[in-house]
Amino acid sequence: GPSHIEVLEEARSQLSAIGLSPSRDDDAEQRSDEEIQADNQRLLTPEVTDPESTLGTREYFNAILARELNERIDAGKKKSDATLGMILFEINQLDVLRSEHGKEGLAKIQGDVGRSLHALTRGTDAPAHFDDARFAVIVPKSTVTGLQQFAARLQASIAKFEHTIGGTTLGLSISVGGACLQSAAGRNDEERLLAETARQLECARTQAASSVSILPEPL
């Protein structure tokens, strides 16, 4: 399949096509939270919304990431204080849950996770559903401490959610990985952030269930 870079290039084309250029004038002021939220809402069309979780799809995530990284590339050091956070997490033992509760049960779990994310994220954040088990959140203007706090709230929310399927109440847990990017000098920083966040998720998965691994320093 296409690489992350190829997918992100396509996302930039989509942004331009709907009037949301991922690039900005170097002299432009940093966008307000209201502007970021409005852009997120414009991008979250039915075509890029997952029906089960009601979150954005991978295509939506790619478009938001392209926008955020391109702005940091254009702004350079003037925007170095606006770190960009990313969270990836997976539902633990989803194969077991799928085999026991089937497609309908899986859709219910994904919907519950989506509702938890909607409740926890800000309008400037971009939560997305990648595939059956994996979800992601782009967190503009985040810090390492902020990501750690968000991961803890996310785990607590999903653990307390009532996942009742066929009369059985399930206790779900997730593994969470995250990283922050301090500034962006080029488009390879997109790959760096994605790769490091995925690596942190793998570190969390190799630990005890419901673990969190956040890179302790920004990239």
Image: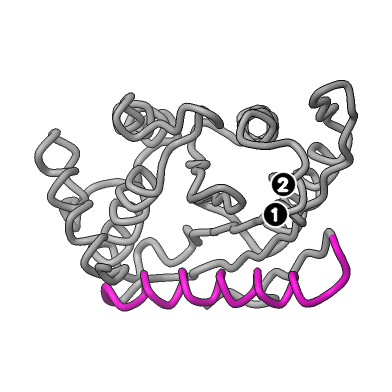
Q: Are marks 1 and 2 in contact (CB under 8 Å)?
A: yes
Point out residue 17 in the picture as x, y percentages from the top left corner: 9, 39
- Looking at the image, which is closer to me, 162 or 26? 162
In this rendering, the answer to whether 7 lies above or below 169 is below
Q: Look at 45% across and 35% down and name the residue there.
A: 33
Give the residue type that dot 2 points to: Ser
Q: CA distance from mark 1 to mark 2?
A: 6 Å
Secondary structure at numbered mark 2: helix
Q: Which residue is mark 2?
A: 99
In this rendering, the answer to whether 78 lies above or below 132 is below
Give the numbered dot on residue 70.
Answer: none
Point out residue 182 in the picture as x, y percentages from the top left corner: 49, 70
Quarter holding residue 189: bottom left
Give the residue type that dot 1 points to: Asp
Q: Which residue is mark 1?
A: 95
Point out residue 74 in the picture as x, y percentages from the top left corner: 23, 63
The boundaries of the magenta stretch are 186-209
